[in-house]
Each structure stands twice: as C-alpha cells, then as structure tokens.
Amino acid sequence: MEHLGPTVDDPATADESELIESLHAMIRHPDFPCLGARSVFRQDRATVRVYDELGSPAAAAQLLEDLCRFASEVDIDDGLASFIALFRGPHIDDERQFEELLWAQLREVHAADEQPWAPDVSTDPDDPHFAFSAAGTAYFIVGLHPSASRDARRAAVPTLVFNLHAQFEELRASGAFPRMRDRIRARDEALQGQINPMVSDHGQSSEALQYSGREVSPDWQAPFEADPGTSDDAGCDSPQAT
C-alpha cells in the first residue's frame, strides 16, 4: 500500500511538527479526493492537536476539552472547519484494530462528557440520523490510519477528523452540498478504482458505518451506547451545536 503523504518512522518520538506536516502533505497531494479537507487546510481552518494513545482515557479528557474549545470558537459562517486529532500510537496492524480503538476512544470521550447530547441528531448508532456528540456539538467523524484499505484513509498515524454537522447543514441549505459530494466521490473512485461502498448521505443510513473506513456487513453494529445526559451545566459555550 502506498501513502499519499510521507510516513513517520517513529511516531512515539517524532516532533509534533513532523506528525502535523505528514497530514498536511497527504491533504496537499493532487490525488487526495476530499475537496472539503483541501479547502479547510488551504484556508487555515484546520485545528490539529497531537495526543498519545488512541483509545485511552488519558487522551479522552484532553480531547473533550479541546473539542469544547474548538466548538466555542469556530464560526461556520467563515467557511468549512475541522478539528483533527493525531495519535502517536499504538501501532495499527489492521482495520479491525483501528475500528476497535476508534470506538473505544469515542466511548471514553462520551463517558467524560457531562453535557447533553446534541439535540438535532440521534444518540442511537443504528439510527440513520445518528451523529457523535461531544460537549453538546454534533460531529461526523472520519478515521484515518496507516493500514487503511482506502487510499484516502491511509494516514501516517491514527487520526480522527471531527467535522461539524452544522457546516453540512449549511451546505445543504445553500444547495452546494450535492455538487461537492459528487465531485469528492468521483475523485475517490478515480483514485481507488471504485467508489467507497460505505458512503451514504445523512439520513439514508447511520454514519457510524463510515467512521472507521472499514467495509462492514449490513448487520454490523457500532460498539457504542450513548447516555443523552441531563446536565444543565454547559461547561463551555458551543454555538455550533446541531
């Protein structure tokens, strides 16, 4: 498998700048299909943070705090924006391992989250209207890692991209979403030789199927159960909650 960006020999000891540059180089590659991600980086709208171990409680607390700050500061009227979490480890051997760690990390973030679930998306990962919620804000998550079968998902280190659901709703409202979606899928098909079998629009099937990037069977179920929560203590101001 070839990477669109450079690999990192030892992520555990690499400078943060090297890890972040590996991601930048991947996104800048002319064949990288996601036009939304390219726009986010071109307009300097990507917030990138580095953590130690994917799936760990230690990373969850800091990740939740950083997501809370991101949601309170970002303005979707200024264009697309993403929060991107890079993890130094562990070494990823295959897609199932990454999938397990991704959902373990989301469970840890949710366990640390005292705010109610974002009100306009479902808490049920089997529901077509499901989206992950952190600090009261809904996100569509894209998992990347070195052993991904899809070229566009093959990053130098385990990576979680948190995309605000609110910005997709803005694109739908403006009429721009279908055109961008179709261009991205066409570019991905040109890169891979076939369209990603897991892609679908929000409301057609659960987006949980797409988070890890692994092709799963129709009866696959996400290893996640949400507690909607009842706390009235916002903790941080998240104006982009959807």
Image: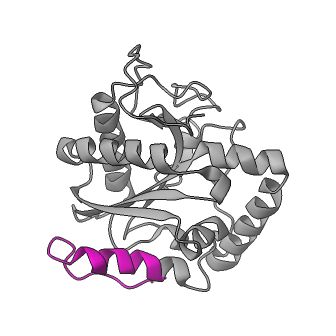
> At x 58% / y 76%, what residue is drawn?
42
As drawn, is 32 to the left or to the right of 50?
A: right
Foreground pick, 127 / 114: 114
- Residue at the (38%, 61%) spot, across then down: 159
Q: How is the image coloured?
A: one colour
Residue 92 position (above or below residue 237): below
Magenta span contains residue 64:
no
* 199 left or right of 48 in image: right
| Residue 205 rendering spot, x and y as whole percentages | 66, 37
Quadrant of the snapshot with the N terminus: bottom left
Task: Give the image location of residue 224, x and y in percent.
Answer: 40, 31
Q: Quadrant of residue 187?
A: bottom right
Judged by its main secondary structure, the magenta piece is loop
| Nearer-the-camera pick, 172 or 149 | 172
Locate the C terminus and report the quarter of the image it occupies.
top right
Tell me what residue is drawn at x 45 percent, y 34 percent. 237
Residue 11 is one of the magenta-drawn residues: yes
Image coordinates for residue 226, horizontal then vertical, percent: 42, 24
Name of the residue lying farthest toward the right:
175
Query: How many numbered circles does the render carry?
Result: 0
User: Residue 217: in sight, yes or no?
Assistant: no
> Which of 105/223 is in front?
105
What residue is shown at x 41% (from left), y 34% (from top)? 135
**Residue at the left extreme of this rendering:** 13
Magenta region: which residues?
A: 1-25
In which quarter of the view is residue 130 placed? top right
In this rendering, the answer to whether 10 lies above or below 227 is below
Most extreme residue toward the top is: 230
* Image location (x, y in percent) of residue 197: 65, 56
